[in-house]
Image (spheres, rainbow, N blue to C red):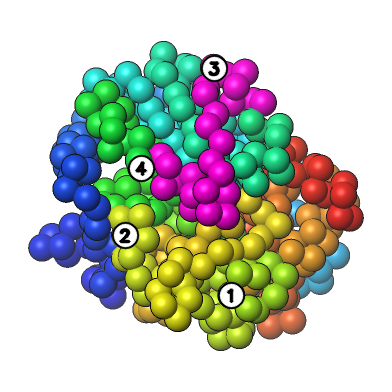
Amino acid sequence: MSSLLQTPSTAPGRFGPYGGRYVPETLMVPLLELERAYEIAKNDPVFQKQFADLLKNFAGRPTPLQFAARLTEKLGGPRIYLKREDLLHTGAHKINNAIGQGLLAVKMGKPRIIAETGAGQHGVASAAIAAHLGLHCVVYMGTEDMARQALNVARMRMLGTEVVGVESGSRTLKDAINEAMRDWVTNIRNTHYLLGSVLGAHPYPTMVRDFHSVIGREAREQILLAEKRLPTHLFACVGGGSNAIGLFYNFLRDHDVKMVGIEAGGRGNGLGEHAVRLAAEQGFTGARPGVLQGTYTYVLQNEDGQIATTHSISAGLDYPAIGPEHAWLADQSRASYAAVSDDAALEAGSLLARTEGIIPALESAHALAGLQTRIPEMSKDDLVILNVSGRGDKDMDTYKRLL
C-alpha cells in the first residue's frame, strides 16, 4: 500500500507507471525551476504563512461541511454531507491552486502568468489572484467554452485579464491547453504557466494536488467533529481531477473509506459522445494509456492513437485525459470511477437546488447524479461526503435552456 501513497524517491512525479515529464527540451528548464521553487516553498514558513493567510482572508476558507438533511430524506439512503467549495471567492475550488501558484510566480520573479480554462472557473481564479498580486494575466479558452461560459469571460476581463479565444480542434479545454503551452515555450523567461488541474508534466500533478489537499484536510476534521467517525464514502466529479484528489488525498490511508469519482457520460457510449476515461466497464469506448500534454495517463483516442474529441454538457469535464494519480488509484482499486449522462446531471442539479437551496455547477451535479445511482447499494448507516466543487451561476443559461 505504501507505493500507492507516496511516489518512490527514485521516480519523482510518478504514480506507478503514470505521470512523468513528456515535454520538449525547451520546457525542461522552466519545469525544473518550478520543481525547485515548489520544493523550497513546501518547507518555507514565510510562503506557507502567506498561502494560509490568502486561503483564509482572500478565498474564504475554511468552507463549511453542511449536513444535507432534506436531500438525505429525499434520497432515503445514507447521511449526506456537502463540502461547500462553491462558497469560496470566485465560486469554486480552483482558487486554492491559483493562490498557491500565484505566490510561486512571485517567488520565481515571473511578472506574467498564463492559464487555460474550460468552465472558466480556473480562469476567473487565475485572473483574481493575478490582480491581487499585481501580475499580468492571459487566459486561453476554447471558443466553444467561451460561448457557453460567457459570464466567466466577462468576469475575467473585468479583473484585467486578456482572454484569448482558441479556434483550433474541438475549441474546448484540450485546445486551450495546447495554446497555453505554445505561449509558455515562447515566453519562458518572464512567464509562469498556472495549470489548472492535476494534469501535465511533473511537478504539476503533485503540486496542484497539494494545494487542493486543504479540501480533504478540512473535511476530515469537520466530519469527525460532527459525526465522531469517518465517512464511508467520498463522491466528487472528475474532469482532470483536482477537486476529487483534493478531497480524496487525506483519506487514502483509511481503507474503509470508499472513494468514487464521477466522469462525464455525455450523450452516449461512442467515441466523441462522452469524456469517460476510467469507467470503461459501463461500455464507454476509446480510453487507454497514452501521453497527452506532458503526462502518461488514460487518454481517449481512436484506433490510430489520435486524440479523440469529447462531449459533456459541463465544460469543466470536457477533456480527453485524466490526472495520472487517478489512473493509478483506479488501477489499484483504491478509488472507483463511474459515469453519468448529461441528462442525469441536469436532473441532479435541479434536485439539489430544490431540496437544499443550492444551485451547483454542472460539474458538481455530476457527482450528485453518481451518488444517486449508488443509493440502492447503500444503507442508512453509511455516511457520505459529496464535494460541491463549484456554484451554478456560470451554468444558468444551460440550466434554463434544457430544464
Tag 1: amino acid? Leu
Classify mark 2: helix, strand or loop.
strand
* Disc number for residue 295: 2
Q: Which one is nearer the viewer's eye here, 300 or 54?
A: 300
* Disc number for residue 194: none
Picture residue at 56% right of the left edge, 86% below the top? 281
Q: Is residue 175 magenta?
A: yes
Marks 2 and 1: CB-CB under 8 Å?
no
Classify mark 3: helix, strand or loop.
loop
Residue 73 picture quarter: bottom right
Marks 4 and 3: CB-CB under 8 Å?
no
Tag 2: amino acid? Thr
Would you name the residue on which mark 4 appears? 181
- Please report the bounds of the magenta region as a residue range: 154-180
The Cα atoms of the two marked residues, 2 and 3, are separated by 31 Å
Tell me if mark 3 has few (under 14), some (14-19) or many (20+) residues whose alpha carbon lies within 10 angstroms of its own. Answer: some
Q: Position of residue 286 (x, y in %)?
A: 51, 78
Farthest left residue in view: 10
* Disc number for residue 271: 1
Would you name the residue on which mark 3 appears? 160
Q: Position of residue 370 (x, y in %)?
A: 67, 69
